[in-house]
Image: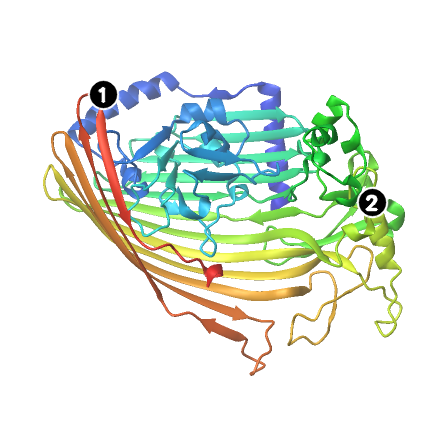
Amino acid sequence: MCAKILNQLINLASLLALLLTSSPLVMSDGHQKVEEKKSKEDKNNKENPVILDEIEVIADRAMDRKTPITFSDVSKEELNTKLGSRDIPLLLNTTPGIYATGQGGGAGDSRINIRGFDQRNTAVMINGVPVNDMENGWVYWSNWDGLGDVTSSIQVQRGLGASKLAISSVGGTLNVITDAAAQKTGLKLKTEYGSGNFLKGTVIANTGLINNQFAASLALVRKVGDGLVEKTWTNAYAYYGAFSYQVNDDHKFELFAIGAPQMHGQRSYKEGIWQFDYETAQDEGIKSKPDQVFGYKGRSQDNDVDDAEENILYSSNWGPVSESVLPNGEIEEYYALWTPDGSTKTRSVSDFADDDAYIMERQNFYHKPQINLNWTGRINDSLTLTNVLYYSQGIGGGSGPYGDGLYKYGTDDFGNINFDAVYTKNSNNIVKGGPSGLAESFTIIRNSVNQHTWIGDILTATYKFSDKLTGTGGIDWRTYTGEHWREVRNLLGGDYFVNTSDKNQTSKYKQLGDKVAYHNDGKVNWLGLFGQANLALDDLSIFGSGSISLTNYERIDYFLKRSNPDEPMTATADAIPGFTAKGGANYNLSENLNVYGEYYFGPDKLFFRQL
């Protein structure tokens, strides 16, 4: 019900945006007065300073000609003019030392490398909170769809960053900042169109800073599209809320909430060059056998240039399906999105454009809301405390084939999966000794589910010893529980699937939603201490920092044979210590020239799945 209402509201907002303007529209009440008032407030703030820049402390922002690292800042203006509807990493491709790619072309499937290091060795932080996966270090940008619409600024620190936390950031640090108090009063309605029937509607409302105390920002996003690459469709929402309250000159609270429930098709397999341009493959002397590679024998052998360009959009991860082979004329699939509990969804042929029903074997579906509560307090003229308490919950996973495989049943003339053959084979497979009158599926589509709960707190104290010497220290605590399993998503015409991976099961016959292959929990408990000192002389800036951490990993396996029926098998690793030590200096030779250097020492970080 909530999803339906939200969908209607956002669709209405998109329609309003379309009727009102074809470009971003900002409507402000007394905008000039707001600017004048802000100027007056700024003057007053010089006499009675209030804390409005605490995000720099929380997010470890580098400062030009002071912090001895290489970094680039991306302003709000650049985000508005250059990002468009792309994932945030793709905007950074023009930044030195950064390589970002959209990979297979699916929405949110982008990856970023900084100085050759992938995201597992690059710290990604949103409003001071690390968002790299606690188990494998990856960042999934589809979880942050719509973030670019509400971002105030981005700072990319290349190489050893300025972060004080004991995080794996040898490649670099990416800080994304959203700041409600920095937004101007107004309502923004925006509609975007693009190739592949792409349509995105965005509604953003900002109060601006009211009475120099309160500010709020709210945003809703609705995005749909067929995808530029074949069947990399997207069906996504995004929401964002930020509330800032300045209690007095010394204390400020901020509350952030962001999430992006989404589903999208993916192109997961690398193809040979003959799949896209057979003539070029021959010219380069590549001995290809198109009829033996996923059975592809169609358009890739056409030498026409236009067709060769079209082939770039080819994906082998989908296939058409006829209504005649579908049980009750419907496609039945099981998955979860809005809540941890999944359910069966059905689609009839008429639900597809031009009644051309198809099945995409590779889909991603996920919702990862995150909530932050930030507090900044100036205890006295020398001591400032900040605390970031955050919570995140992940719901969803990704799909793929399981069993005998999909391609052994052949493909059509365009290299697509022959789902008609798969459905026919499965629906006619009545096995002797199996459930009476029911058909066993040789192959199915499964979901690989990863649901998690993540709670953390970062407490930081900053002490100003003098105008030249500042010290910072704090505690970084996190606890994470990830639940992992595979489940039957689509039986592809059969009535059940046989799986014996669960050694404690009562039945090997699996139906929609039943768990297969594996089922385990991963628990990660983290405690870190960090400290840093900064010395700023006339032309020389020096800093030194260090951190220590203790990480505990635990695995609970529900499929391994139990010695006690009531207790699943559990393995706990010894607590793993970690540390970092780094220092650096910057010297300003002139007003336009400076030199700097930094040194780092610390072990490689071990992730849960490496143990």
Please rate how many residues cluster around mark 2, counting C-alpha atoms within 10 Å: few if below 14, some from 14 to 19, many from 20.
many
Q: Residue furthest front?
A: 285
Q: Is 341 drawn above or below residue 84 in the view shown?
A: below
Q: Residue at x 81, y 62 (%)?
A: 495
Residue 461 in view: no
Q: Is 515 drawn above or below residue 566 in the view shown?
A: above
Q: Residue furthest left?
A: 466
- The kind of secondary structure element at disc 1 is loop
How is the structure coloured here?
A: rainbow
Question: Percent from the top left, x then y, of residue 308?
Answer: 72, 27
Please rate how many residues cluster around mark 1, counting C-alpha atoms within 10 Å: few if below 14, some from 14 to 19, many from 20.
few
Q: Give the number of the mark in front: 2 or 1.
A: 1
Question: Percent from the top left, x then y, of residue 611?
Answer: 46, 64
Q: Residue at x 78, y 42 (%)?
A: 416
Residue located beneath label 2 in the image: 321
Question: Percent from the top left, x then y, of residue 154?
Answer: 39, 33
- The kind of secondary structure element at disc 2 is loop
Residue 303 in view: yes
Q: Nearer the viewer, residue 345 or 433?
A: 433
Q: Nearer the viewer, residue 115 or 351?
A: 115
Residue located beneath label 1 in the image: 592
**Tag 2: amino acid:** Val
